[in-house]
Image (cartoon, rainbow, N blue to C red):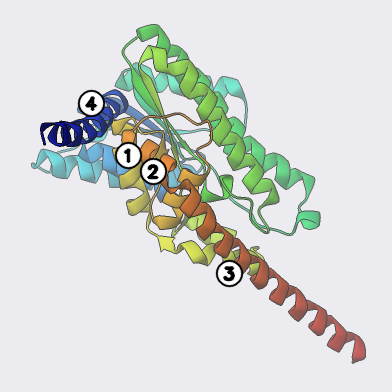
Amino acid sequence: MFGVVLSAVVCGLVPYLVIRALWCHFNPKRQHLQGKHVLVTGGSSGIGLSVARQVALLGAKVTLVARNVERLQKAKEEVESVCAKLKGDGSSSSNRVQVFSVDLAGRRENIATAIKEAEASQGPVYMLVNCAGFARAQVFEDIPQSLVKELIDVNLMGSFTVTQEVVRGMKQRAEGGAVVFTSSQGGLVGLYGFTAYSAAKAAVVKLAEALHMELKPHGITVTVCYPPDTQTPGFEEENKTKPVETRLISEAAGLFTPEQVAKKLVDDALQGNFSSTVGFEGFMLTTLCAGMGPITDSLSLLSQVFLTGLFRLISAFYLWSFSNLIRREHEKKIAAASRTKAE
């Protein structure tokens, strides 16, 4: 009887100790932003603006970087109102929010100058959130070369250049920090109509994975956000050229608000998690596509170990439905072409 009891204790204790060890190792203490400087690219609207409001609520000083001066000024006023409410006295909070109009796909010198001026005013950047980006969906052979270049320049190279400039200072100061990239669920799975966009956003993921390995010894965390379709001005613009097949496939993951995505992004970044998602599809995709990606929290690791097989089976049904959807639309086009020819 004693042996049975001992075996039961050991069988229960070993998994507990393993899980506890994983939890302690992969779940670092949550960072705070009170009084720290957060720089947000693409901060004039959409997810970027929502992120700015979230970090302002946590007491951060905020720099917004985007191209459109008019939208930047409006965004500045919105974030300042959040800061004023936080203070509770309605007084001006203009010293906690600043804006810079910069083309992130433009000259590197302009980007470097803006970052230096931002840090001279608000102090060193502690958290960088790369939200600048855009999507366009078109059938592969119809995508102009100029659009492919713009997608890569804005979605990949813009984040690459800004992050280089910020990370250099983070490493020199040796005070830690956080870097956030915004990819997309389209960066994890290639979708009809998103050949160029998915390629650019997938490159962001690999950039983040490699950078995570470089920055970990310096105490700097890296997080990648994978938004689903999100109700932003950019999404409305994207829908203008989106093929019907792309629209129907994308709708499977639902439509989220920028506030939902931003809140999860900030929470995951402060916790040091590598992946940030909302919704079941996002969780399934990051679990399936983890591969040799960074391990930053025990829950994600356990999910990848135990759920990958199940999620692969579920994904087969998704892919089957997508394939049927595309086939039906293809048949409709052929029938419509035949009717036109007959007329």
Instruction: Answer with mark 3 or mark 2, whichever residue precedes in sequence.
Output: 3
Placement of 341 over or under 244, stated as above or below: below
Q: Quadrant of the C terminus?
A: bottom right
The foreground one among 187 and 135 is: 187
Instruction: Answer with mark 1 or mark 4, whichever residue precedes in sequence.
Output: 4
Q: Amino acid at mark 1?
A: Leu
Instruction: Determine which residue is flagged by label 4.
Output: 29
Q: Position of residue 268 (x, y in %)?
A: 33, 38
At 53% from the left edge and 53% from the top edge, which residue is drawn? 312
Q: Are marks 2 and 1 in contact (CB under 8 Å)?
A: yes
Q: Position of residue 296 (x, y in %)?
A: 37, 29
CA gap, disc 4 and disc 2: 21 Å
The foreground one among 133 and 188 is: 188
Say which mark, if any, is on residue 303: 2
At mark 4, the secondary structure is: loop
Residue that protrudes farthest toward the right in the picture: 342
Say which mark, if any, is on residue 239: none
Placement of 35 over or under 129, stated as above or below: above
Q: Amino acid at mark 4?
A: Lys
Q: Give the crowd class for mark 4: few <14, some 14-19, many >=20 residues within 10 Å.
A: few
CA gap, disc 1 and disc 4: 15 Å
Q: Amino acid at mark 3?
A: Leu
Q: Looking at the image, can residue 103 be seen?
A: no
Q: Are marks 3 and 2 in contact (CB under 8 Å)?
A: no
